[in-house]
Image (cartoon, helix red, strand yellow):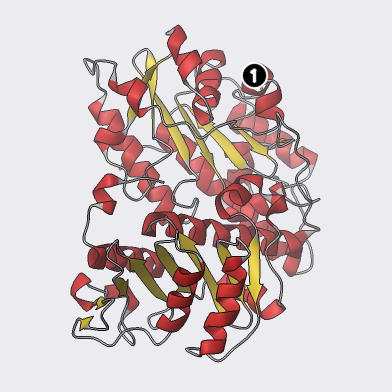
Amino acid sequence: MESPQFNDLPARDQIAEICRHIYQAGLTTTSGGNLSLLDKDGTIWVSPAAVDKGRLRGEDVVGLYPDGSVRGSRNPSSEVPFHRAIYRARPELRAIIHAHPPALVAFSIARRRPDLAILPETRAVCGRVGFAPYALPGSKELGTGIAAEFEKGHDAVIMENHGAVVGGRDLLNAFERFEALEFAARIEAAAASVGTPVMAQTGPNDRPSSDTWDASQEAAKKPRANSCEHEREILVRLLKRAYQQGLTSSLACSMSLRCNNGFLLNPDSIPCWQVASRDILQLDLDRQENEIAARGHGTIHHAIYAHNPDIQCVVIAPPPHVMAFGVSDVTMNMRTIPESWILLQDIPAVDYGAPGQDLEAFARLFGPERPAVLVQHQALYVTGATPLQAFDRLEVAELSARALIMGQQLGGVSPMDKHQVEALRRRFLAPGSPGLTVSEA
């Protein structure tokens, strides 16, 4: 992940902003956790001890200089020793995040590591996860144990009966890993509550998105005569909303919107919470170079639009409760309440490699009777005749999945029967019927 606008901020402001994001996302508490950033000159900038994480300011961040001097009016975090130990063990790491997000703490107290074999794309971000034995917070022993795991090549470590710590080449990279690891832990924990988590079966050509695609340079070559400014604003608003609603992590959502003779698409390299209208890519549907240059998710959006002229918006995201069904041996039954089935009908699940193995066949799966497809071990693909309809379907799918999981915990779920479903089909989905539509306020 590269973001010149963010990485150009002073180190203190970077720490304050990421700390606020961690808190707002419910990944730490008012007092919990600490962040640091290692400057080129050897200065360690670290979050202070005993300061509200939800309202941290740049001026609160403390600078620890190589000569031993300290800059700042606050006391540095008491866990600076293990930050120093990690930087010594892995000089290429320039940022560290430690916090107590609930799913990773669950693994910590269960004395287990999340098994990222269920989510290959998260494994590509986080790598192998280490596990450090318990030691007193702030102690030399804690730093020694964590650093030993990082020395093995781990970029993320579960701390026994404590929390988690991740490192990165910069603070955004560390945050990406931290957030992705917590998402994976949530998904595995939810999957275990409804069934048995299943490992992804992958082959050399099985990745849904064979490469991360950032077509910024290609898109920049094209004139913006028909720049779709209103549609750009809609896309940006919905990307940020998806993130705020917990439907995706920073970089896991790929959203597009048809415009003129092409489509708009958010770049893979900019976090949802930071994307702006100027960052949105505008791509043509009928240009051959698009098929040559576009890789990763871009080709999937292109194929869905090419084979489905009525689809106006495509969203690819990994809502955690939906993905619990995407990585387990239990099917997500959408015949729960009328709204869920009318909006989404029965959601088919396909193998992890399906989009990469036969993209045209995958694109043809979508249509009026099949607006969403779950790609196992990767993401939910949702379409709509309007951007708000697609977004609504994404939200309804996640809330339905949460309800299914809660229902199982209460003793079991009783879905609507086939006669009730058929009555819904005749009333809401037959030609000329009103359906369920939502419009802008």
**In the displayed structure, does residue 71 sit left or right of residue 279?**
left
Instruction: Identify which residue, 294 or 388, lies in the foreground.
Output: 294
261 over 106 or under it: above or below: above
Quadrant housing residue 341: top right
Q: Quadrant of residue 96?
A: bottom left
Residue closest to the far front: 67
Q: Amino acid at mark 1?
A: Arg
Q: Residue at x 63, y 32 (%)?
A: 208
Q: Is residue 28 left or right of residue 350?
A: left
Left or right position of 370 against 91: right
Looking at the image, how many numbered discs can be counted on the residues?
1
Image quarter where the C terminus lies is: top left
Please say if 52 is above or below 14.
below
Q: Which residue lies at the image location 52% right of the left edge and 81% below the top edge? A: 143
Horizontal side of residue 20 vs 254, given as left or right:
left
At mark 1, the secondary structure is loop
- Give the percent coordinates (x, y) of residue 6: 27, 52
Q: Position of residue 410 (x, y in %)?
A: 74, 70
Q: Is residue 290 above or below residue 208?
A: above
Which of these two is toward me, 91 or 23?
A: 91
| Residue 324 location (% of width, % of height) | 68, 54
Q: Is residue 26 visible?
A: no
Q: Which residue is mark 1?
A: 364
Going 68% across and 45% down the picture, which residue do you hit? 377
Picture coordinates of residue 80, whole percent (x, y) = 40, 81
The answer to whether residue 349 is visible is: yes
User: On screen, 117 above or below 25?
Assistant: above
User: Which picture quadrant has residue 411?
Assistant: bottom right
Foreground residue among 362 and 59: 59
Pointer 1 local density, CA inside 10 Å: few below 14, some 14–19, many at least 20? some
